[in-house]
Amino acid sequence: MFELNSILKQAQEFSGKIHEVHEQLSQIRVTGSAAGGMVIVEMNGHQNMLSCKIDPALFKSGDQELLEELIIAATNDAVSESRIKQSETLQSLADIGDPSSLGDIIGKLMPK
């Protein structure tokens, strides 16, 4: 029974860490830009777009295709930055110990 209590405690700690990382990802803010900042996209660590700012001069140009391409470029830039921050944040999960520990926990709970 003691081993089961230990396993459950480890699982609870891991669950708490996952929740903490989820919250951290929600708080991360990154930006991507295109055309020297004429299009700026803001995103969080979950890669949800939070805002998109477009310089009014781009509307005046009337070049819809250019504007669409710049939005895509700025979004891709923000996604790239978000992935870097996400990776750094998720690395903190490794700080709970041996990465196989969750597998060990699950393995001990599963019948053979």
Image: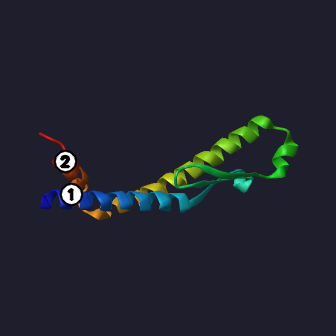
Query: Viewer-proximal residue, 56 or 90?
Result: 90
Percent coordinates x, y for residue 43 in the rendering: 60, 53
Mark 1: amino acid: Ile
| Residue at point 59%, 45% (across, down) | 76
Gap in angstroms between the C-alphas marked 1 and 2: 8 Å
Residue 28 appears in the figure: no
Q: Which quarter of the rendered picture does the N terminus lie within?
A: bottom left
Please rate how many residues cluster around mark 2, counting C-alpha atoms within 10 Å: few if below 14, some from 14 to 19, many from 20: few
Asked whether disc 1 touches disc 2, contact meaning CB atoms under 8 Å apart, the reply is yes
| Residue at point 79%, 36% (across, down) | 64
Q: Secondary structure at mark 2?
A: helix
| Residue at point 25%, 53% (across, down) | 102
Residue 3 appears in the figure: yes
Check disc 2 and report the residue beneath it: 109
Check disc 1 and report the residue beneath it: 7
Percent coordinates x, y for residue 99 in the rendering: 25, 55
Most distant residue in the top direction: 65
Query: Viewer-proximal residue, 20 or 25?
Result: 20
Please rate how many residues cluster around mark 1, counting C-alpha atoms within 10 Å: few if below 14, some from 14 to 19, many from 20: some
| Residue at point 71%, 56% (across, down) | 37
Residue 29 as seen in the image, left or right of residue 71: left
Give me the disc on residue 64: none
Q: Secondary structure at mark 1?
A: helix
Q: Quadrant of residue 60?
A: top right
Q: Is residue 92 above or below residue 67?
A: below
